[in-house]
Amino acid sequence: MAQQDRPAPAGVDPTKPSIARAYDVVLGGRDNYAIDRAVVGEMLKIVPELPEVAAYNRQILSRGVRYLVEEAGIRQFIDLGSGLPTQENTHQVAQRSAPDARVVYVDNDPIVLAHGRSLLVENENTTVVTADLRHPDTVITHPEVRRLIDFSQPVGVLLVGILHHLHDSEDPRGVAKAYMDAVPGGSYMFMTSFCASFPEAAALEATYLRVLGTGRFRTLQELQGFFGDLEMVDPGLVSLPEWRPETPISHDLSVAERLMAGGVARKR
Ligand code: SAM
């Protein structure tokens, strides 16, 4: 049976696909429209395992945030390109270990604020800001960001599943560096991104660019460059399931397992 779409909230154009809504389709959510399902259909023709990839990305998000709270002692997070609320959002993971953890979600898609407000802003330590992460100064000086984030204390900067949506001309490395320059020593950058580690990467990149307008598959070496001179946390930049897995991995990784890479690094 065809899905009954919810009415589009103010500012949301249901005739144009959106990154946040396409990701929601892949995650099996309800906050998407026919156009989003159509673009995901194109992507699935090349890599049918995309839902698995999204699940790996959400799983590493949980493992990474847990690491940052429990082992690195981080108590404040800026989650850039946070996406629509789903299971195990950053504040839920962080506040389970540290109830006083503060989280600012930043996304430029108005649907994230529309659907996120009730689910993501569950307490006074959590907020959603509509802003373009390509303008770090605007984000860093935003009153809501300043209300929850103390820039004299270590910050967890999350760039999870987002830098592949920045074109090379938008200087993703410079954007990441601007955030890390704004936070003190002892802060962490946590990044995951599409990785050109499998034969279909070029075809999938071409499809992303055609139907969504963004989606760069970069080499591990290019992705490593995004961390600059930060100190990598073990095991470094690896395929998502290889980053501190809950159970050891003893098989050759599938395309879905290699499609994205991620890592965590510390500012000295
Ligand atoms: N971080 C979440 C995760 O990994 O599960 C969501 C990732 S989703 C693939 C990417 C999100 O980044 C979308 O919600 C999209 O709206 C947002 N986004 C894309 N470009 C952005 C920009 N320039 N500024 C802020 N958010 C952006």
Image: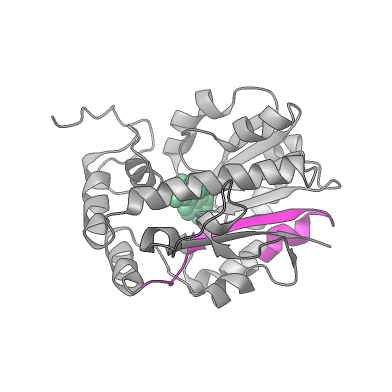
Q: Is residue 197 magenta?
A: yes
Instruction: From this view, report whether residue 32 is shown above or below residue 232.
Output: above
- Residue at 38 percent across and 49 percent down: it is 52
Instruction: Give the x, y percent position of residue 53.
Output: 41, 53
Q: How is the image coloured?
A: one colour
Which sits in the foreground, 46 or 185?
Answer: 46
Instruction: Give the x, y percent position of residue 89.
Output: 55, 35
Q: Which quadrant of the structure image shows residue 190?
A: bottom right
In this picture, which residue range is highlighted in magenta? 177-198
Which sits in the foreground, 238 or 164?
Answer: 238
Q: Quadrant of the C terminus?
A: bottom right
Q: Is residue 18 magenta?
A: no
Number of marks present in the image shown: 0
Which sits in the foreground, 103 or 167?
Answer: 103
Q: Is residue 33 at all visible to an observer of this figure? A: yes
- Residue at 43 percent across and 45 percent down: it is 55
Residue at the far left in the pictured view: 1
Instruction: Give the x, y percent position of residue 3.
Output: 20, 31
Q: Is residue 108 at all visible to an observer of this figure? A: no
Q: Quadrant of the N terminus?
A: top left
